[in-house]
Image (cartoon, rainbow, N blue to C red):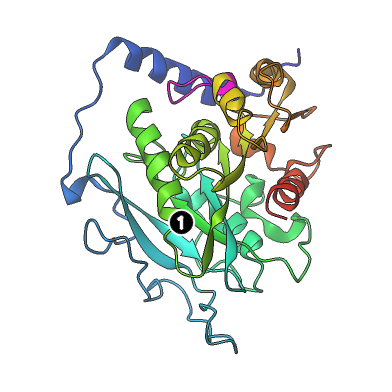
Amino acid sequence: MKTKTAFTLLVCMLIMASLAACAKASPTPISTAASEAPAEPTAGETGSLAVKTSAPTDEPTTAPEANANVLPPDPQIITITTDDNFTLTGYYYPAAAENAPVVVLMHWMMGDHKDWNEVAVWLQNRGMTNPFENPGDGSQFRWWDPTWFPTIPAEKSYAVLVFSFRDCKPWKAGCQSVQRENWLKDAQAAMQFARELEGVNPNRIAAIGSSIGADGAADGCKLLNDEFPGACKGALSLSPGDYLGVSYATTVRQLGTSDPAVAAWCIAEPAEYGICQSAEGAGNTAFKGFSIPDGDHGNMLLRPELDPLPMQLILDFLDEVLK
């Protein structure tokens, strides 16, 4: 087993210490006060399922494309209401074509939806430069440096939904408390919301997540299919760890009971690959596991020097499940 980097140890210590404390305490009280929703982006009216059509104030406006039935590429502010009446905020990046497949991106504990700023524009693939200021340094934290990202064929464009789990802030501040049961509700609500987005195919949805979002992607995919069978085509998880209080291996097994089996891809460094091995034995014929030599935890797997390259695996996954 390779020696973990100091960064990995810090992340794992923060997550596991918080989870242990959470297990001994009663669940955090749920508040529906609008002031407790993430401060950015500025959300619209609480409870709205409609996507706001105004562009964010901190980005340049991109001219609409020729096809009047296709939404402009500008990311649109969205609000999502969970089943316990909590308001989540995020952005919707429309695809270049109607009836597009949707990719829901779920962040890790060290940040919020802004961790996906560059990845969202990359998957949208409409020639737009990320209009937001990244909360971290792209020369050190490589998921904010798109210059090395694999090229996506011009004919491919995905609708992308990003959101922040409750009580989570941008890089370094991260999630302020561990709310496993509530984050499970957030993941489910985001997957349900993805079906309501304008211009998408409600039955071609995929989820990708990192760390807490890795479990959220798999759990949210399963929960969506419980309500709308076949709507979620697969979940890709970067460093899952049963962080939402649900066994990842069990969720993978349940996804495999569908006909056809729903894809579940697990990507982790060797020191954390045990959970992928457990899921591999769960009986899902659409499961794939990838151990990444010299990898790291969560978003730290998104680096250019790794082989296999997780960013390419993301494209391979989407090609397979949303074809």
The N terminus: image quadrant: top right
Q: Judging from the image, what secondary structure is the residue with disc 1 in?
A: loop
- In the picture as drawn, the residue positioned furthest to the left comes out as 33
Query: What secondary structure prevails in the magenta region?
Result: loop
Using the image as rendered, state which of residue 200 and residue 168 is in the foreground: 200
| Front in this rendered view, residue 238 or 247 | 247
Q: Is residue 156 above or below residue 309?
A: below
For residue 5, which quarter of the picture? top right
Q: Amino acid at mark 1?
A: Arg
Residue 310: x %, y % from top left: 74, 41
Task: Identify the image quadrant of the C terminus.
Answer: bottom right
Can residue 176 be seen from the camera position used here? no
The residue beneath circle 1 is 195
Identified at 70% across, 16% down, the residue is 281
Tell me if I can see residue 80 in this picture. yes
Question: In the rendering, at what x and y percent does residue 149 appear?
Answer: 74, 55
Mark 1 nearby-residue class (10 Å; few <14, some 14–19, many ≥20): many
Residue at the spot 20% in from the left edge and 34% down from the top edge: 30
Q: Residue at x 39, y 33 (%)?
A: 184
Q: Residue at x 37, y 61 (%)?
A: 78
Query: Residue 194 location in percent, x, y?
Result: 46, 55
Q: Which of the 4 quarters of the picture holds residue 95?
A: bottom right
**Range of magenta residues:** 242-249
The answer to whether 127 is drawn above or below residue 221 in the figure is below
Q: Is residue 147 above or below residue 140?
A: below
The question of residue 64 being in magenta is answered with: no
Point out the residue furthest to the top here. Answer: 24
Task: In the displayed orientation, state which residue is furthest to the front.
Answer: 259
Q: Position of residue 283 (x, y in %)?
A: 69, 20
Instruction: In the rendered view, tell whether residue 231 sits above or below residue 110.
Output: below
